[in-house]
Image (cartoon, rainbow, N blue to C red):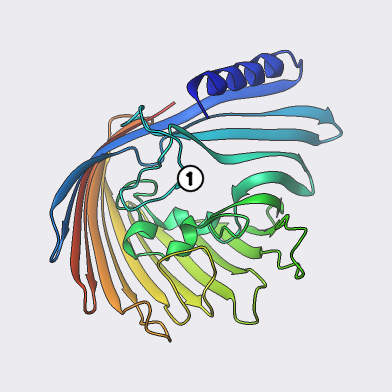
Amino acid sequence: MNKKFLVTAMSLVLAGGMGLANADVVLYGQLDVSIDSTDVDGGEDDINMGSNRSAVGVKGKEDLGGGLKAVYKVEWQVDIDDSEQGPGTNEDDTEGRNNSEFKGRDMFVGLKGNFGRVLFGSMSTAYKSPASKLDPFYRTRNQSRNIGLQSGLHKGRGEEGQGRATNTIRYDSPSLSGFKLAATYTLDNNKSDANDDDPYSLGVTYKGGNLYGFASYLTTQAGDDDSVFQIGAKYKMGDAAVWGMYEVDDGRISGTTGTDKGADIFNLGGSYKIGNNLVSFDYAEGSESDNNTVPEYTTWRIGGKHMFSKRTMVYLTHSNQDIDGAGEIDITSLGLRIKF
């Protein structure tokens, strides 16, 4: 996708949306650039610049009457640290970069009402969505899913994507005494496939007072054990917060990295807010997979961020992952984020 196409598409969406008397159209985005230092035992040290899933998008809604609304969202990931890159397909590589200037993220249309909402398109699954709220450095180089605090399943994408899935139908229920239900069903669009192994995920979240919790399940239906389950919670106590999460992988889910059958992950973390500053610490252990393709490891992350305003922050994080038989990986990241 080139620049001219992006500008033209966004102009058409904005122009069309503004022409609707009862429509609300919002242009939004997030730009994040970091300087990242990586130190691998037995390897070369490296310093890079990362764009950390910077994104720009358009979203909106139209009142259809009777409590029913049409909703839409079109979001692109942008690589602002290297605008001369050629086309690519990888959203989440080890540098926290993608290989193209613009790449589709959540893109959907849907209906919203007293029944909840139903969406059609490409979007985060019911497995990915809730866990990101336990990561104070989500969408940075040292985000949890990059360093073993959460599994690599959270960044799988495509028709078998566990993180963001294409060709997907999603339902979100209204809040029921603090509880919300979510479900996604992904069509594989493979007419020649003798088996209709369409992935699906189910989840429940709870938010009440200072407590947030979730549980979710995902399977590709490719086999009896081709599934994963996670449960987690976060509790706030004034300026402090603590959280924990556990992922149980009952079988390798194809198209992902960082997990395999039996490679479960247990994570604990906490944060403390001091004025416009927040400091946090996380620790996780990953068990060895049943077939020994994923080794046992421990990982920890310490970080801090300063909020200049509601839209602009600077952050500094350091992570260490100690992999059994492979040594340690240390990553330090200093970044600046601006939202609009």
Tell which of 99 and 218 is nearer to you: 99
Query: Based on the displayed image, in which of its 4 quarters is residue 205 positioned?
Result: bottom right
Q: Is residue 25 left or right of residue 316?
A: right
Residue 281 image-quadrant placement:
bottom left
Which residue does the image show at 79% across and 49% down from the upper left?
115
Residue 117: image x %, image y %? 73, 46
What amino acid type should be assigned to the residue bearing mark 1? Thr
Which quarter of the picture shows residue 266?
bottom left
Give whichever of 14, 232 is nearer the camera.
14
Residue 334 seen in the figure: yes
Residue 180: percent from the left, percent from the top? 65, 58
Q: Quadrant of the C terminus?
A: top left
> Is residue 232 placed above or below 142 in the rendered structure?
below
> Along the line of sight, which residue is nearer the eye, 68 or 157?
157
Q: Which residue is mark 1?
A: 89
Q: Quick check: 126 above or below 53? A: below
Q: Secondary structure at mark 1?
A: loop
Residue 210, can we see it? no
